[in-house]
Image (spheres, grey):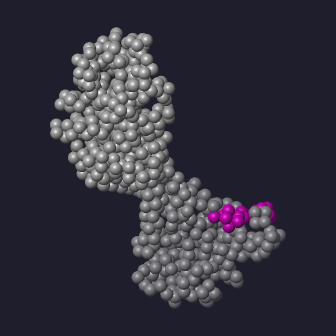
Amino acid sequence: MNWLAWKMLTGDRAKYLGIVFGVAFGTLLIAQQSSIFVGLMRRTSSQIIDVTEADLWIMDKAQQNIDEIRPMPETRLHQVRGVDGVEWAVRLFKGLVRCRTSEGNFRQAILVGVDDTSLVGAPRRMLQGSVFDLRRPDGIIVDQAGFRLLFPGQPVTTGVTVDMNDRRAVVVGICDVTPPFQTFPVIYTRYSQATLFIPAERNSLSFVLAKAKPGVDQNQLCQRISSATHLKAMTWDQFFWFNIHYYLTNTGIPINFGITVTLGFIVGAAIAGQTFYLFTLENLKQFGSLKAMGVENLRLVGMILFQAAAVGVMGFGIGVGLAAGFFEFMEMSGQADLRGMYVPWQIVAITGTAVSLIVTAASLLSLRKVLILEPAMVFK
Amino acid sequence: MSDLDSTTRTPQTIADSAVVCRGVTKEFGTGETRVRALQDVDLNISYGCMTLLVGPSGCGKTTLISIMAGLLDPTAGEVILLGQSRQQLTGRRLVRFRAENIGFVFQQYNLLPTLTAAENVAVPLIIRRHARKEAIEQAADMLAAVGLGDKCHSRPAQLSGGQQQRVAIARALVNRPRLLVCDEPTAALDARSGRNVMDLLRKTTVQPDRAVIVVTHDNRVYDFGDQIVSMSDGRVDSIEDRRTGERPVTMNSASTPSTLHH
């Protein structure tokens, strides 16, 4: 009977494509908007993602996220180093700085000051130069996208200079970083250099990055550091989600994207549901004939569910394909800053569930009509 | 109640009849909206003959044919369908019974527009879980039997009305049903096509072990019937047996002529 169901479904190409389009459109909206949302949320933690050497992030107790820094005194570093179970601990500066190029361009940038000795926190994906070039006088490493913002139209190269806080800095390397939430250039320098590039403050230590000794439980170590120093200590994973949670609960982003995703679901369900319902209504006489000829309700239900599953799979495949293609196209064309955004498997799974709901709702609407259909109606 | 309930009814009578209706009443709706479509109908449909069910619109022909085809339950009365009490045929058993024993020809053909003629004819076999390839081969043979051997791959939209009705007849016959129910098979056809279809129905369907019931408004096809049952207002008015040449017997709700019971 699945053969018959398939023939009935695909016989009228226009209607068949209409239903598939409805499902695909809903899928595209849900998958694409959800992926952008996830990508944006991921970007809020981009500097956390890019630091791979440290196990723990230690910061002031009042700190709510990675961007609103409450600087700590330098002595905090030594306190952390003194906690049992800490293999090493280093300083990290993070702040915003105003940059001016020789052409007169002005840009706000994210300044990351890494430990002078170990360079822990420095970028790992170098496109030009080396992280060790940071040891050169006034040396900074700029991310490639940020370089293009600072020097629009110019070839991406080292050797150019920028002014920060009236101090000259030389670009000694170009790196690739996880795109930040704000479209600011990301500039890396040594910690000691960073404190010169920003206006003077009494305290300048943003974070302490620490490594646990082998075999030491990171969660327990965090607790020990907190109780010993009265600082907030979190594992990489905890800090990543802590930061995302802040943006989820303190910005309108989830609501905006939630509305779009819900609209995608509703529009997809409406188009697919209505077309599928009308399709079944138009075939009601045929279903009645089949009933009269001896097809049980259960087999008719199977036929309709098969048809729903068929359009669901087709629409879902096309929709997810289009969403993935959209990010690929944007990445290649550079039309919008959607770097690093993609359709994660979790979104594929969630979208799949949503599409299942859409086609199930559509088929349930139709099923009712078929189930209550009197086979005697074929004589009317 | 008719004399079918009396001692004149014998097992022989039921065995000779494809369908026996005794005091069949059908009502639709409840309370003030209740409509009585059939009232105390007694009728025998014999094997080996074509019975025409005639009468004006709204007289209950469609309701009666639906009950006799096992598509509708009577409100009261008894129906013996191919030797089995209709009351005992319920749920899946009834559905399977219909699939195995009853063929349908509809006024508007009800062919699936997306299937070819052969595929349409194969549908009843596929319903009975025959392999698709085998079913389509059998369907092609059946199409050849109704003179459409060269139209196997045509879709309904590519066929004339008469040809579509022939496909519908082939579909109804492919399962070798013991009861064939035809609803206005010539209504959508011109006079010539209508006669051709009736001629085909007579030649291909009337068999000693099969009964054919045709509902029709079309008095031009009365010649094809062996038995003509006239209805009005939910009752059987008269029954004419053209094989014996007996004059129409006028019926009423209180009695049933003995000619029905041989």
**Direction from residue A98 to residue A123 in the image, left or right:** right
Residues in magenta, as a range: A221-240
Between B42 and A263, the residue placed more toward the observer is: B42
Instruction: Name, please, the residue furthest toward the left.
Output: B191
Q: Nearer the viewer, residue A246 or B208?
A: B208
Task: Indicate the quadrant containing the C terminus of chain A: top left, top right, bottom left or bottom right.
Answer: top left
Q: Is residue B243 above or below residue A123?
A: above
Residue at image coords 43%, 61%: A318
Residue at far right of view: A84
Residue ID at (60%, 79%): A123
Q: Main secondary structure of the magenta part?
A: helix
Residue A104, image quadrant: bottom left
Q: Residue furthest top?
A: B254
Residue at image point 38% right, 30% down: B69
The residue closer to the viewer here, B68 or A238, is B68
Asked if residue A313 can be seen in this view, the reply is yes
Placement of A214 over or under B137, stated as above or below? below
* Magenta residue check for A182: no
Residue A352 horizontal/vertical position (percent)? 51, 55
- Rendering coords of residue A150 (x, y %): 47, 79
Q: Position of residue B162 (x, y in %)?
A: 22, 43
* Lateral position of residue B154 relative to residue A88, left or right: left
Q: Is residue B158 left or right of residue A199?
A: left
Report which quarter residue B79 is drawn in: top left
Front-lying residue, B61 or B12: B12
| Above or below, A293 relative to B244 | below
Residue A308 visible to an observer of this rendering: no
Q: Position of residue A76 (x, y in %)?
A: 74, 70
Instruction: Count the numbered circles shown.
Output: 0
Residue lying at 60% horizontally and 76% vertically, measured from the top left: A112
Residue A227 drawn in magenta: yes
